[in-house]
Amino acid sequence: MKLYDFKMAPNPRRVRVYLAEKGIDVEMVQVDIPAGENLGEEFRAINPRSVLPTLVLDDGTVIDESVAICRYFEELHPEPPLMGTDAKSRAVIESAQRHMEWDGLMSVAEAFRNANPAFDDRGISGSTGVPRIPDLVERGRASTERFFASLNDNLGQSTYVAGEDYSIADITAFCVVDFAKWIQIRAGDQHPHLKRWYAEVSARPSSSA
Ligand SMILES: N[C@@H](CCC(=O)N[C@@H](CS)C(=O)NCC(=O)O)C(=O)O
């Protein structure tokens, strides 16, 4: 089994943090996104979508969505549970994790990619042919600010993003909050609950994965 990874990118980081929380070791192969290695022939033969992370199982099966990769390991290594333990907790955690992804990760990515000339012909991750739209930068920044406010409210109601237990929703949120530093958006005094939570999750050993 091999996990194609890129240390600097937020989606691969979600999977690395998840694996660290579980104590699972997987062989990793670095694919340099800024250098365009994910767009080269060699990686495209493995994954024509050109995205990371990509997990390749020993039988050749390719899984290239972060949460699907985590789901695969969750089934094989249920302890400690990071995706819920029964119908209700699984649904609540999945819902919260999607909020972190759609409202948070996509917003930061929109502001980051559309501001960066390196992505001129790669406005959306994956292969080329999708123009960057600089006008979307402000929209991405506004929706990131909205996300920070709503995450702060969420964390005013519960210890963790999806309730009283640490879960994959916290992993996505943590990676989003760090990714937002790339667009110079950080938690401030108006986000006391977010700051309390961030201090705790960033002290976990998995945060350096
Ligand atoms: N929905 C995918 C998104 C994967 C994704 O967009 N990965 C980025 C890195 S964070 C990527 O591979 N980008 C390649 C590129 O921009 O060329 C997931 O959750 O894993």
Image (cartoon, rainbow, N blue to C red):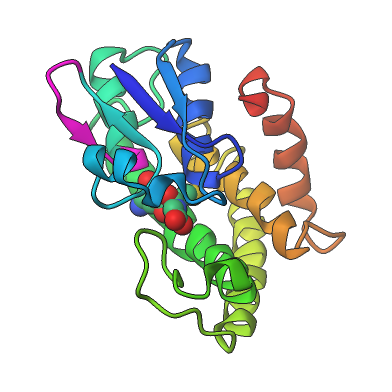
Task: Give the residue displayed 24% in from the left and 37% down from the top.
Answer: 46
* Residue 136 against residue 110 in the figure, above or below: below
Left/right of residue 59 with respect to residue 71 in the rendered view: left
Task: Give the residue displayed 64% in from the left and 59% down from the top.
Answer: 153
Of residue 54 and residue 156, the one placed in the foreground of this image is 54
Task: Give the residue displayed 67% in from the left and 25% down from the top.
Answer: 208
Of residue 124 and residue 175, the one placed in the foreground of this image is 124
Asked if residue 64 lies in the magenta stretch, the reply is yes
Task: Give the residue displayed 38% in from the left and 76% down from the top.
Answer: 130
Q: Position of residue 122 (x, y in %)?
A: 44, 69
Q: Position of residue 100 (x, y in %)?
A: 48, 54
Of residue 13 and residue 54, the one placed in the foreground of this image is 54
Left/right of residue 103 with respect to residue 77 in the rendered view: right
* Residue 35 against residue 203 in the figure, above or below: below
Q: Position of residue 165 (x, y in %)?
A: 51, 29
User: In the rendered image, which quarter contains the C terminus?
Assistant: top right
Residue placed furthest toward the right: 189
Left/right of residue 203 with respect to residue 18 in the rendered view: right
Q: Which residues are magenta?
A: 58-67
Q: Quadrant of residue 54?
A: top left
Q: Main secondary structure of the magenta part?
A: loop
Asked if residue 24 lies in the magenta stretch, the reply is no
Q: Quadrant of residue 196?
A: top right
Res 97 seen here: no
Of residue 98 and residue 108, the one placed in the foreground of this image is 108
* Residue 92 against residue 143 in the figure, above or below: above
Q: Position of residue 74 (x, y in %)?
A: 30, 22
Q: Quadrant of residue 112?
A: bottom right
